[in-house]
Image (cartoon, grey):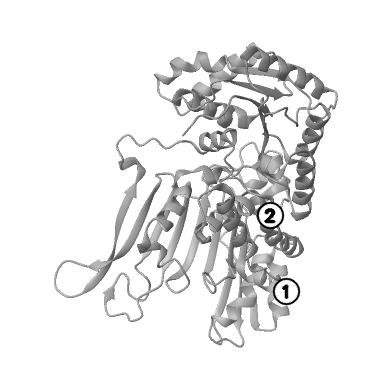
Amino acid sequence: MENPSGQVLVIFGASGDLAKRKLLPALFALHCGGFLPENFAIIGAGRTAMDSEEYRRSRADDIKKHARASAADFGKLGSFMELVNYVSFDTDNPSEYSRLAEFAAEVRARAGIPDNMTFYLGVPPEMFSPIASGLEKCGLSASSGGFRRVVVEKPFGTSLESARAINAKLRSVFDEGEIYRIDHYLGKETVQNILVLRFANEIFESLWNRDHIDSVEISVSESLGVENRGAYYEKSGALRDMVQNHLLNLAAFVAMECPSSFGAESIRDEVAKVLECLRPMDAKAIDSGTVRGQYAASGGMAAYRSEKNVAADSLTETFAALKFHIENWRWGGVPFYLYTGKRLSERKSEVVINFKSAPVQMFVGQCSGRSCNKLTLRIQPDEGVWLKFGLKVPGAGYEVAQVSMDFNYSSISGANLPDAYERLLLDAMSGDATLYARSDALEAGWKFIDPILARWAERGADGLEFYRRIIAEAPDHLKKNGVLMMEIGYDQKDAVKELLRESGRFEKIVGLTDLTGKDRIVAATVMTGK
């Protein structure tokens, strides 16, 4: 692969956490690998008042802490920091942009860089439009014989309406082909390998359809809480933060048709087609096919509502799960399940393809009554692929147990998995948009998500959403006179008992206390069960 053309990379939000932890460490790793342009400079633009020398000193420490580099690589830190410049910059002030233009011209002239610039907007989405306007007014958005590219971080809007407004503003300044909407999950090696696994291997692609696949599960679980991002998370929640972008994009990679070529637009065409085929969810489907939750205090760690900058009565979800369908010939009738949450038991991201069971269950054992066949693509940690199937347990008889054939990237001698930001930054600077979201795909995702957000807002104001769902569905799973018992919050007894009475399907509704005398359980008997 050829190195990108000479250019200036301008990072807005250069004094923020993203630049410290991800962007500059990734650029340093590219520098160590010899992948950066020959004529290249970085301009950090941030609100913090400091000069270039101060910025270099502070970022050098951050790179040592966060970079994916060997001890020998850090010998190149000095040469990398010579590429880094900084300008104190207020993005809200239109007059500041002409100063940025002058500074960029000086940097280009000093380093002999052509009129090529990539802008990285590592700032909140409400700043995308002001920055685009500022770049246009000072003349930086246009090039005399070179190129302009703008990379925008998620969240790309908070709704379909806001995403369309941002798209409209960016496209009024830049061409669609110059806009790179980043999703760092798509930069992970295993995600890209989904396409190779499918389309380079007939043994998988021939089975990759509704005739052979029972269901698809995609999960991203995090062991950490929101940490210091409470203010952001209150405006976002798990559905906006993870499902609308990361998980739906993963689903599209799993479900897409084989592209006409492996060029950027061919792949992005197929991604958009999948997202446009998402079956819209009405109120009934949302009530029965989605779940949301919020982490409580445990193991000495604070509850979400006790986190900094989080409202004491917040209803923002830190866990989200949904069941949905893709309405096309390949996937008709196959349920897709998405799960994501914070403060869960482990940090893990994976795709699981559950194949259908054999038509006749001829054997007993671990796989009896369900499929033995699962294909798991682990995205993080321990990237790899696992294929599970049934084999005979040694000894007499034909008892079957599930076994696994594993591939792990760590088993490859000398395997060097690049960080997602390394891959995506290099792609943006090279003009390769394959792993970046296009506006039509982005808006199709928001069109699917918006009704879920609206329904949750409608049903979740009193915190009784889960009880309504359980009460509605439980009689279809219990026999007549069966007992439903639900754990409740200390102040929810009367409200839950009222929901049971309103349903008209329960009697003998009582509340039970725990050993401390606090209301803990509401129990009721089914009048008309299955």
Within-10-Å neighbours for mark 1: few <14, some 14–19, many 20+: few
The residue under label 1 is 498
Residue at (42% x, 53% y) in the render:
377
Q: Disc 1 to disc 2, how far (Cα)?
A: 45 Å
Q: Of circles 1 and 2, which is in front?
A: 2
Please tell me which residue is depicted at 76% across the width and 43% down the height of the picture: 171
Residue 475 pos. (x, y %):
59, 81
**Tag of residue 444:** none
Q: Point out residue 243 in the picture as x, y percentages from the top left corner.
A: 61, 54
Mark found first going from the N terminus, 1 or 2: 2
Residue 90: image x %, image y %? 79, 25
Where is 316 relative to 514, above or below? above
Res 336 → quadrant: bottom right
Helix, strand or loop status at disc 1: helix
Local secondary structure at mark 2: helix
**Percent position of residue 520, x then y:** 61, 64
Left or right, 502 with respect to 298, comes to: right
Task: Residue lying at the far front in this picture: please name it.
Answer: 145
Q: Are marks 1 and 2 in contact (CB under 8 Å)?
A: no
| Residue 159 visible in the displayed image | yes
| Three-letter code, disc 2 | Asp
Tell me if residue 521 can be seen: no
Three-letter amino acid code at the position of disc 1: Glu
Work out whether residue 275 or residue 379 is closer to the camera in this orientation and state it.
Answer: 275
Residue with the mark numbered 2: 440
Q: Indicate whether 467 appears above or below 238.
A: below
Which corner quadrant holds the C terminus?
bottom right
